[in-house]
Image (cartoon, rainbow, N blue to C red):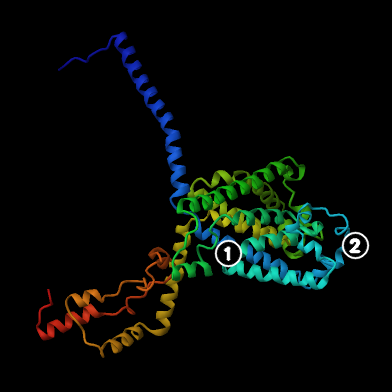
Amino acid sequence: MSDKVRLSPQQWLRTIGTMLAGLIRDGWKLLISLPVRGWNFAESWLLDSKKARYGISVSRIVFGVTGLGLLLTNFRTRLYSFASGSVWNDEVANIKSDFPKIWIFSSFHNAITNDAAYTALYVLLMLLAVLVILGWRTKIVLPIYFVLWVSFIEANDMIGDQGDNMYRIALFFFLFADVSGRWSLDARRRRKNGTQRILPREISNLFHNLVLVILTAQVSFVYVSGALYKAGGTPWSGGYAIYNPLSTERFGTWPFLTELITTWAPLVAFLTVGSMIMQMCFPLMLLTRPTRIIALIAIMSFHIGIGVTMGLPWFSLTMIAIDFIFIRDRTWKGLLDRIHGGYREARSEVEGPDAPRDAESEGSSDKPVKTGKSTRKKAPTGDRDPKKTDAPAEEERELVPTPTLASRPRTRASGSTRIRKTGTAPAS
């Protein structure tokens, strides 16, 4: 048996010193490499590809629905609320907002006393909102819609709210992003005619992704500052803040829901304190996927509750629309696949499993079946249309449902049967 080797005190010190030196050296290398790694990650994230293309397209659609909904619900009272009937509030003589003083945003203000001109601008703004929803010529329509919307909403400053500010800020930054890359007429035209680039791909990706960063920062500022402001008030720290507005006639739009929520004191305290904590932690919860899912469900439920119980639907829709950018494209694609799969299953159940197969077999019986290379060349190539060579295959796979096995031509199977019957070998 070998005796254990005992280290002298000098050797112990030398070993510990060597270990500490290695740790310091590795830590210093890591510290030096962090800026390089951060720079490489930021460069790759900003320039390689456009992020959240589905999410920002949904934001565009919801923004258009919000604008159109606000205009439609106020169409009958447009003259009383915004035009000549609102002259009594002194907005025409003494402009409260600075936007109507800028000529490009003064169209609605100049038409306040002319009901016909104001109605024409009002209808034009509704048509532009529809085009924003459809995503038709967005690079042209969206700037015009932005100018007219700001002119409309700022002409009468007394009846606006904070949702108008977020709507205007996000709509401005949408001008620099690809908000029609998915689910739009522009995307369909690009798939048909090919993409015509004006800016280099890296510059376009940079603008698009920077808009996502700016909107994330803007939403985080709104939530965190709101939570800090609420925490300094007695009603919020006391846990009964939501009881006060719901008890008023202006915000208690649904008495039944108001009574249902405010009757039980623990629920009032939970919703009051929970909303503050959720707003405060929202930016940090976006960093990981599990916490991001919880944060999005909580914040969207929060806005839905405000929109329904307090009668503020357009403010809530504006915030929900911006929150859609935090949902990954992978999630939207998975949702599309589920919808397409459910549609195909429902269609196959209605039509019957043998109906498409019989139709294909009857149609293919009139044509001779070729073997060898000709059979392989004429095999189905999937979802891509050979006429659309300029369109990327990725977009078509995302937006065009994959045909079922029953509906695909069975040329290879029938060809193999023909070979067995005739006894001929396939051509080499």
> Is 279 left, or right, of 159 in this rendering?
left
Amino acid residing under circle 2: Trp
Q: Say above or below: 33 vs 87.
A: above
Q: Say above or below: 307 vs 357.
A: above
Q: Say above or below: 368 vs 74.
A: below
Q: Label 2 crowding class (10 Å Cα cut-off): few <14, some 14-19, many 20+?
A: few
| 114 or 24: nearer the viewer | 114
Amino acid residing under circle 1: Thr
Which residue is drawn at the image coordinates 72% and 68% (left, top)?
Answer: 71
Disc 1 target residue = 138
Which residue is drawn at the image coordinates 37% and 69% (left, top)?
Answer: 389
Q: Secondary structure at mark 1?
A: helix
Quarter of the rendering containing residue 154: bottom right
Quarter of the rendering containing residue 22: top left
| 200 or 30: nearer the viewer | 200
Q: Which mark is residue 169?
A: none
Q: Secondary structure at mark 2?
A: helix
Which residue is drawn at the image coordinates 63% and 44% (left, top)?
Answer: 280
Disc 2 target residue = 88
